[in-house]
Image: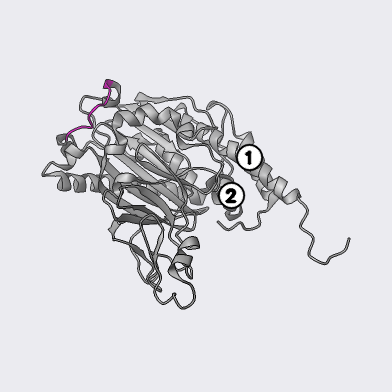
Amino acid sequence: MNKPTIDLRHVRDVVAVAEASLGPVEKAGILPGEAYTSPGFWEFEKQAIFAKEWLCIAHVNEIPNPGDYIQLTVMEEPVIVARDEAGEVHALSAVCQHRGHPIVGGVKDAPPGKCLNARRLVCPYHTWAYGMDGTLQGAPSMEETVPLEELRKNNSLPRIRMEIFHGLVFISFDADVPPVAQKLGKLDDEFRGYGLAELVPGSTFVQQGLEWNWKLHHENALEPYHTSYVHSGYHNAVPSNLTRFYPIDPQEGQVFRTTGFAGDDGDLFEIANVRRLPSIPGLSEEQRGRVFFVSILPCVVAVLEPTMVTITFLSPTGADRLDSRRVNLYPRAAAEVSEFPQICGEHLEKVKVIVGQDAVTQMALQRAYQSQFKPRGRFSHLETAISQLNDWMVCRYRDGLARLEQAQARPLPREAGSHA
């Protein structure tokens, strides 16, 4: 990722106000408006958070078969997630190592996250070809200058550091970040109960150019305070008074809550058809009686319920812009029901209503956070998760600011031939 110059004074000012916003929910406040609206602070976040954390970008069953691959853009980097002939999953740079044309994009384009299948990954510019593990396999008209065997030594698609955790594909641009399982240990039993790695996609909903900050998306997902008002008539099955919050460690990678069902056979969006599908096997009695909401920071919001799991992958593109890809996952037994495509479609249409309602509030907040009268805010107990999200953010702001100060304090290298 490119590293533009960052205004150290501006970052210090924003982080100082953010630190003053911390505390238990009874005393905590909203992060400063600049943390949501400032392009300069967004540049700082890219270095302080997104360049240093695990970024969850896909589920393995989005590419179920050998030769399957999806193209994504992650923090301005073109990335391919591919499954090779042996069934192994790889995260690769999608930049051809000949002249830099993207493997997907430009001459050959595809919707982000759409599963494609091929024997090889072929650059459309000069048809250099790569295996699904990134190894260079063909480079036409190059033998006159460089033999193919020589090219293969240094021109494979770069592999990006990747780990898979319960079927979720994580990548990182930092070689030193601890293993995913260490960061997300609190989710291990939960995801195992849902058999998350075995669930299969039923539908995908892609949105691009959403006009709000990525942190607002997490805050909205984890606080149930608004649901009785914004989603009146759509969210009654999981009333906010049945919500429970859990302690977090800001050094880890998740913030989560649960909300119980108001009655038996609950469903988050009250879609009767979904309840005709087989539920996820192996759930505990507790898991069958509630919905589990979790932010896997900084890139995922997940909702786990007895019939299905929704994973929303977030890809911020600016202080006030992000793209999202929402994948609904179901147990394999549900996917074998004859009515499954119809039920998935009905479910998706109902979800789009909820998503649209949230979009209105998020765009309004984004605009209002530029106001000189933007409040410090005081939280309801139903917004406990926002104070926890702030703890996580500020922990990384402090570390990122320390690195930035250290880097800017280093003397510039003396030019060759210069004199003291």
1 displayed left or right of 292: right
- In which quadrant of the rendered view does residue 224 lie? top left
345 displayed left or right of 185: left
Vertical side of 256 occupied by 203: above or below? below
Inspect the image, locate mark 2, and give the three-letter code of the amino acid beneath it: Gln
- Asked whether residue 234 appears in the rendered view, the answer is no
285 displayed left or right of 18: left
Residue 91, image x, y percentages? 41, 51
Q: Nearer the viewer, residue 76 or 45?
A: 76
20 displayed left or right of 416: left
Q: Nearer the viewer, residue 131 or 246?
A: 131
Inspect the image, locate mark 1, and give the three-letter code of the amino acid beneath it: Asp
Residue farthest to the left, as pictured: 338
Q: Residue at x 50, y 52 (%)?
A: 367
Provide the residue designation for mark 1.
399
Residue 83, image x, y percentages? 33, 51
- Asked whether residue 357 appears in the rendered view, the answer is yes
Q: Which residues are magenta?
A: 278-285
Provide the residue designation for mark 2.
47
Q: Nearer the viewer, residue 405 or 157?
A: 157
